[in-house]
Image: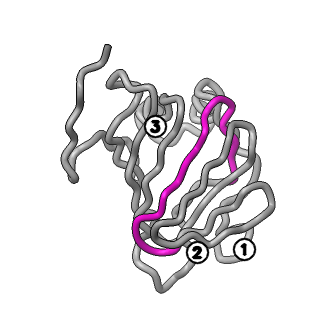
């Protein structure tokens, strides 16, 4: 059984600029719990998780979320959860807005290992694609910035 874990506000594992992992598979967790600050047009491309539920809770700002082809504007206190196999993405599409603060929970855990391994590749696109497949993430479309003609 895993021990209790206390993680202070500025602590956690950081493998790329968007997310600070507070709990993940590398620490024996059954889920990933992370906090992110999504800057203008810094969200991921449309993607699908093979095994994980992806849950977002907005702490500050307005986050635009795409689920399949539908767009939603989420504000503080709003929540979205996407089951495995459903295309989704999110972004801060409001140029005059500071980064959107978001809590993200992935169940089961393991996304932290994907980000850790991708950070070690220094931008090798072919190997990054292999890692995404290994960890069950498939890119299936553009970012919201591209979709909305903002990027």
Q: Is residue 96 magenta?
A: no
Residue under numbered circle 2? 93
Secondary structure at numbered mark 1? loop
Of label 2 and label 1, which has the lower sequence position?
A: 2
9 vs 118, left or right, is left
Give the colouring mode of the picture: one colour
Q: Position of residue 15 (x, y in %)?
A: 37, 41
User: Which residue shows up at 69% across the image and 37% down it?
Assistant: 84
Q: Position of residue 51 (x, y in %)?
A: 64, 29
- Span colored in magenta: 46-62
Of label 1 and label 3, which has the lower sequence position?
A: 3
Name the image quarter holding residue 31: top left
Q: Which mark is residue 148?
A: 1
Of label 2 and label 3, which has the lower sequence position?
A: 2
Marks 1 and 2: in contact by CB < 8 Å?
yes
User: Which residue shows up at 41% across the image and 65% down it?
Assistant: 59
Classify 70 as above or below 103.
below
The quadrant the C terminus occupies is: bottom right
Q: Is residue 53 magenta?
A: yes
Secondary structure at numbered mark 2? loop
Secondary structure at numbered mark 3? helix
Q: CA distance from mark 2 to mark 1?
A: 9 Å
Magenta span: chief secondary structure: strand
Classify 65 as above or below 140.
below
Name the image quarter holding residue 25: top left
6 vs 135, left or right, is left
Residue under numbered circle 3? 115
129 vs 4, left or right, is right
User: Which residue shows up at 69% across the image and 61% down it?
Assistant: 66
Q: CA distance from mark 1 to mark 3?
A: 26 Å
Q: Position of residue 46 (x, y in %)?
A: 69, 53
């Amino acid at each position: 059984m895993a021990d209790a874990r206390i993680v202070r506000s500025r602590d956690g594992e950081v493998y790329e600029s968007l997310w600070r992992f507070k709990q993940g598979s590398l620490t024996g967790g059954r889920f990933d719990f992370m906090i992110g600050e999504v800057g203008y047009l810094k969200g991921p491309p449309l993607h699908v998780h093979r095994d994980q539920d992806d849950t977002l809770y907005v702490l500050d700002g307005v986050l635009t979320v795409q689920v399949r082809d539908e767009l939603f504007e989420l504000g503080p206190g709003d929540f979205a959860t996407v089951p495995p196999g459903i295309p989704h993405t999110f972004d801060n599409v409001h140029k005059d807005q500071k980064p959107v603060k978001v809590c993200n929970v992935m169940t089961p855990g393991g996304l932290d290992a994907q980000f850790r391994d991708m950070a070690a590749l220094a931008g090798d696109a072919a190997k990054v694609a292999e890692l995404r497949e290994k960890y069950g993430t498939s890119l299936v479309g553009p970012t919201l910035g591209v979709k909305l003609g903002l990027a």
